[in-house]
Amino acid sequence: MDKNKAKKEIEKLRKDINYHNHKYYVENSPIISDFEFDKLLSRLEELEKIFPDLITSDSPTQRVGGEPLEGFTTVEHKVAMLSLDNTYNYNELRDFDKRIKKTVENIEYVVEPKIDGVGVALLYENSIFIRGTTRGDGVRGDDISSNLKTIHSIPLRLMGNKLNNVEVRGEVYMSLKGFKKLNNEQKKKGNPIFANPRNATAGSIRQLDPRIVESRPLDIFIYFLSYSDKEFSTHFEAIKLLKDAGFRVNPLIEKVNDIEGVIEYCKKLEKRRETLDYEIDGAVIKVNSYAQQKKLGETSKNPRWAISYKFAAKQSTTKLNDIVVQVGRTGTLTPVAILEPVEVGGVTVSRATLHNFDEVKRKDILIGDFVLIERSGDVIPQVVKSISEKRTGEEKKKNIPKKCPICKTDVIREKGEVAVRCPNKLCPARLKWRIRYYASRDAMDIDHLGESTIDKLLDLGLIDNIADLYFLKKDDVLKLEGFKEKSAQNLLDSIEKSKRQDLSRLIYGLGIRHVGKYAAQLIASKYNSIDELSKANEEELREIDGLGEKSAEAIATFFATEENISLIERLKDIGVKTKEAKKDGLPLQGKKFLFTGGLSSLSRPEASDIIKQKGGIVASSISKDIDYVILGDKPGSKYDKAKKMNLKIIDEYEFKNLIS
C-alpha cells in the first residue's frame, strides 16, 4: 500500500475514532454501534502495524500498552496545585464573602460539586496530551501518564483550535456502580475489598501496570484551566471552552450572583448527593472573574478566591455495643449492629447491618469494637470495618445462634449457602415479614400498612396470616394507635384494591424463596392462574427460559406444602385475583423490557404495569435476551452496557408508540 495514501487514511481514522470516543465516553450519545467502532480501530491498528513509523503518541491505539513500570518519575507542575480552605457551615461561607468584598466588588461565583476522588494535572502542547501527574506536594507530582491514558474520557488530542498549550486540573473517580462491581470481582478472586470508591481510585491510579488500571472503572471530571497561552476573562467561560475542547465537565457546575445564591445551590447539591452515581463530599466555590482572582491572590497554601464547603460526613466512627439477630421473611437470621449513636451524613445512626455471619467473620467484627460506619442515600447504614488498633482485649465474639431468637426452633444452614435460617414457618418474626413483603409496593401495593401497623395488628391478635388482612373491619383498625376514621378507611380501601392486582404481583407477594419480581413475571407469562402454577412440577418449571434451578425447586416445594395451598384457597375465596385471561395474542407477549433513567410522562410503576398488562416482562438487570431498553432522563450504566451488547434502545416517545 502507498505510504502517502496510508497516512491520509490513518489521519482520517484517528479523527473519526476520536470523534466517536468523545460521543461515547463524554457525551454519552454514540451514533455508531460498537461493532462499527471496533472495525475503525482494527483498521487503524492494521495500518500502524504496516507503517510503525506513522504511530504517534496521540493515536487511539496508544492508550494501553507496554510492560509494567518500575516506578514513577517526579515532575514539576506548570502551575502549583494549591489546596483549598474548608468551611463547614453557611455562616463561614458568608464570612468568606465578607473577606472577598474587602478587596473586590460586584462578585459572581461559580459553584461546583466537590468530587471525592484523586486530583490530577494534565498537560497539553499543540493540543496533544503530553503528561499527566498526581498532585504530590502541590509543586511536584508523580508522572502517571500511562495510567491516565487508559481513561477514555481524557482526550489524547484536543478538539477545535481554541485551546492549544494548556494545563488542566481534574478529579479521577470511580462510579458507585463500578466500585460495587470491582469489589464483587475482588471477593470472587479472594482479594481484599476496597473500603470506598476513593480508596479504590487511589489504589488503581497508582498501579505500575497500566493494563491493571485499564481494567478498573475509572473516569474523570475536568474542573479548572490552570494554565493557557491564551487569555480568558472568567472561569465559567473557561469551563465552556474545556467542554468544547473535548474534556468531560460536570453538568452540575453553576454560576450564581451572590453568596446567598451560593448557599442555596449548596443546599440543592447536598440534596442531589444521594441520587448521583459518584461520591461528592462538598462544593467548591470560586470567584468567577480572572481579574478579581488575580487581585485577591493566594497564600503559600491556598487561593484567597476559592473555598470548599464540606457536606456532612457519610462515614463515621463509633462503638459497637452489641450484635442482635433479626429473623426475616424466609427465616434468614441477619446480624445487626447496635451502635453508640453517631451522626452519619446528617442522620443519627444507632443500628447498622452486618449482612450475614460470614461477613462478621471476614471483617473480624467483635462486640465492643470501634467500627467505621457508612451510609449512602436511603440504604441501611452498614459497618465497613472494625478498627482493631483500638481494642482493649475485652471485646467479645458473636457466635452463630443455634436456635431462632424468636421461636427457639433449631436453625439450619443448607450446604453451599451463606444464610442461617429458622425453618419454622409459623415463627412470628417470619409472619411479620411475610405480611410486610405481601403489602410492599412491588407486590400487592397496600398503602398505609407499614411495619409498625403490622406489629400492632399482630400484637392485638387481629391477624395471623396474609389472608386475615381481608377480614379486617373499620372497628378493628380504629383500635390501633394513630388511626382515625379517614386513615382507617384509607387502609381498608387499599386492602380491597389489592384484590385486583395482576398475577405476577401476587406470585411475588407470596414470598417464595428465590422468586423475585422478574422471576414472578416469567412465571405469570407462562401460566394463566395460581392453580395452573400449583400443578407444575419442578422439571416443567426448569424449562421456563430465564428461571433458575433454585427458583424452580423453591416453587415446587412451596406448592407441595399444605399450609400454602390452604392460604391460596382462602385468598381465592376472599376474591383476590388468582388468574388472568389467556395471554396469547397480546401485543407485547413475551417481550422483555428494561428501564434506565427517569420517564417524564409516566412513573416507572405505571409504565411497568402497562407492559405487564400487554403480556410483556420488566427486567431489573441487563442481559442479552432483553428485547427493548427504554431510555429515560439521566440513564445509568445499563445504557452503556446495552450499547455494548447491541440491544435495541428506544426513547420514551418510541415506547409510548409501542404500547399505544
Image: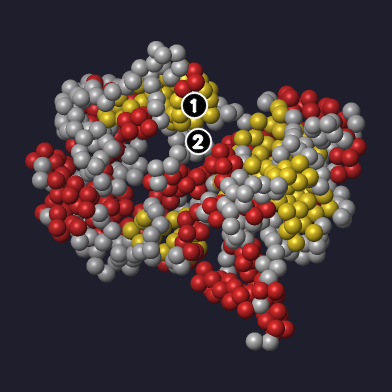
Indicate the amino acid at tag 1. Answer: Leu
Res 41 seen here: yes
- Asked which secondary structure carries label 2, the reply is loop
Q: Say if mark 2 contacts mark 1, CB within 8 Å.
A: yes
Q: Which mark is residue 244?
A: none
Residue extending farthest front: 70
Q: Which residue is mark 1?
A: 372
446 over 628 or under it: above or below? above
Q: Across the whole image, how many numbered discs are drawn on residues?
A: 2
* Percent x, y of residue 586: 29, 66
Q: Quadrant of residue 410?
A: top left
Residue 317 horizontal side relative to residue 127, left or right: left
Q: Earlier in the sequence, mark 2 or mark 1?
A: 2
143 over 321 or under it: above or below? below
Q: Which residue is mark 2?
A: 195
* Percent x, y of residue 347: 52, 25
- Asked which secondary structure carries label 1, the reply is strand
